[in-house]
Image: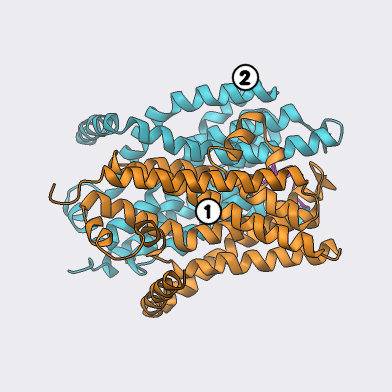
Chain colours: A orange, B cyan
Amino acid sequence: MIRHGRIFGSFVSAEIKNELAYRLNFVLGLVEMLLVVGTSLGAVLVLFTQAKTLNGWTLPEMIALTGVYYLVQGGVNLIFAPSFEKLMEYVRLGTLDFTLLKPASAQFLVSTRHISIVRISDSVLGFVVLGVGLVMLGEAITPWAAVAFALTLACGVAVVYSLLLTLVTLSFWFVRVDNILAIFWAFTDAGRFPIDLYPGWLRFTLATIVPIGIAVTVPAEAISGRMSLETFAAMLAGTAFSVTFASWFWRRGLRSYTGASA
Amino acid sequence: MALVRTYRALLLAGFQQMAQYRIQSLLWMLFAIIRPVIFLAAWVAIATAQGGAVSGYTVGDFAAYYVCLAWVTQLVMAWNSQEFEWEVNQGRLSAKLLRPLHPIHYSIVDNIVYKVTTLPVLAVILIVISVAFGAHYQTQPWHVVVFVPSIILAAALFFVFGYIVASLAFWATRMRTANTLWQRASFVFAGQIAPVALMPVWLQAMAYGLPFWYMQGAPTEILQGTATPERAAFILVGQVAWLIVCYAVFRVVWRRGVRAYSAVGA
C-alpha cells in the first residue's frame, strides 16, 4: 500500500512537471471548466424558475447534486480516463509489454499511470458547488451523513472505474473499443439529474450498465440526508461485486494478451 | 458543370467510406439523442408535478419540442470547426489548399454523407420517443412549407459560424476553448435547456439577439407547429440577417487567416 502510494506520487510529480511547461493550456482548461459548470448551474436555475421541486428535489439539493456530478466526473477524468485511453493504445501497439515487466501490480499501473492535472479543476469546482448547495440547504450535516457521503462517493467512483476497466479490458480481444467508451461518455450527461427522474429503460441503464446515475445520485442523497439504509447497503454490495468482477476480468483478459512480437 | 461532376465523385467516395463504419455512426447518434431526452424527462417531471402543464406547456408539448429539437440538431449539425483544428495542427490543410477546390466543399460533402446515412435510424428512434411520451404536434401544412427554408438557413448559419470558429485555428493552435464556448452558448441560448418561451425574460432577450437560437430553437418551433405566422416571419428574417453577417465575417477572417497560416513544420 505504502509502496503503491509512493509510485503514485512519482506519477503525479511527473505529470505536474509536464503540465508546468504548458501554463496557458492549464489556464484555458480552467476557463472551459468554469463555463461548463456555470452553464450547468444555469440550467438548474432555469428549471427552478418554473418549479419549486424537481421530482421531490429542492433547489439546494439539486445544486448539491450538480456538485457531486462534477466531483465524480473529476475523479474519473483526473486519473482513470487518461490512463485507460493510453492503455488501449499500448495494447494496440504492443507496448504494454513494458508495463507488464515492471515489478508492481499491472492493474494498478495501467489505471493510474497518466494523470490529467487540469481536471483537478472539475473536482475543486464540484466541491465549491456542493458547498454552496449545502449552505443553501442550511441544515447541520450529521456525522453519519458525512461518513455515508464519503463512502458512497468513493463507491460511486469505484463503480465507474470498474465499468471503464471492464470496457478497456475488451481491447485484448477487439482492437477498436474506443467506440464502446463513446457509449459511456454519451450517457454520462444523464448524471446531471437525479436518476429517479428518468423513464424505466434509462433508469435501468444508468443504475447497471452505465452506473453514472447511481454514482452521482446516491452520494447526493447521502449528504442531504435522504438516503435509505437499503440504498446504502445495496451501494456497498454493488461496489464490492463490480470491483471484484472487473479485477477478475482484467486478469482473464491479460492472459489473452499476446504482446508486440507475437 | 464541373462542380456537379466533382460533387458526384466526392459523394460516391464518401458513401463508400461510410459503409465501412456503420456501427460507429450509430453510436454517434446516441449523443444526438441523450441530451434532449434528459431535459425532456426533467420537464415532464415538473409538468406532471404541477398537474400536467408548465406555463401552458403540456407533457405532450414538451415531448414534441424535444423530438423536433433532436431532429433539427441532427439536420443542422456540422463538425468542421473541430476537424479543422486537427487539420491545421497536423499541417494537413496544406495539401488541401493546393487542390483546385476550396476546402469548404470537402466539409459539405462529408456533412451530407453523414446525415443521409444516419437520419433513417434517428427517425425510428424519435418516433418511438414520440409515442412513449405522447408527443402532441400542432404542425399545419404551412409550417412544413416554412420549415424547409428555415432549416436550410439554420444549417447554413451553423456551417458558416462553425467555419468562423474554425478559422481561429490559423492564429491559435489550441481551439478547444473556442469550441467549448460555442457549445455552452448553444446549450443556454439555442433552446436546449428549455423552449425559449419558458426562460426568464432577460435570457429570452439575449437568445433573440444572439445567433444560436436561430440555428436550433427557432426552426424547432416551426416544425413543432407552435410558431404563429408573425413569429415564423420574425424567425426567417433573423436567420437571413445573421447568415449575411456571419458570411461577411467569414470572408474577411478566412482571407486574413490563410495569409497568416504557416503549416506546422513548414
Q: Is residue A248 above or below residue B144?
A: below
The reply to whether the magenta stretch includes residue A136 is no
Check residue B183 in the rendering and tell me which mark sits there, or answer none: 1
Counting from the top left corner in percent of width and height, residue B46 is at 79, 39
Check disc 2 and report the residue beneath it.
Answer: B141
In x, y percent, where is residue B174? 38, 66
Q: Is residue B258 above or below residue A13?
A: above
Q: CA distance from mark 2 to mark 1?
A: 33 Å
Say few, some or many: other residues with alpha carbon within 10 Å of mark 1 (under 14 / 14 to 19 / 20 or more): some
Residue shown at the point (73%, 67%) measured from the top left: A131
Residue B199 belongs to magenta span? yes
Question: Callout 2, which amino acid?
Answer: Pro
Q: Chain of mark 1?
A: B
> To which quarter of the image does residue A63 belong?
bottom right
Across and down, in percent, residue B58 comes to 78, 30
Callout 2: chain:
B
- Left/right placement of residue B175 relative to residue B243 reads left
Q: Amino acid at mark 1?
A: Gln
**Tag count in the figure?**
2
Highlighted range, magenta: B193-200
**What is the crowding at mark 2: few (fewer than 14 residues within 10 Å), some, or many (at least 20)?**
few
Decide: is A160 above or below B12: below
Q: Main secondary structure of the magenta part?
A: loop
Q: Quadrant of the N terminus of chain B?
A: top left
Quarter holding the C terminus of chain B? bottom left
Q: Position of residue A78 (x, y in %)?
A: 48, 63
SS state under label 1: helix
- Residue B200 appears in the picture as rendered: yes
Which residue is located at x 43 percent, y 36 percent?
A: B27
Pair 2/1: label in front = 1
Helix, strand or loop for disc 2 = helix
Q: Using the rendered view, name the quadrant where residue B3 is placed.
A: top left
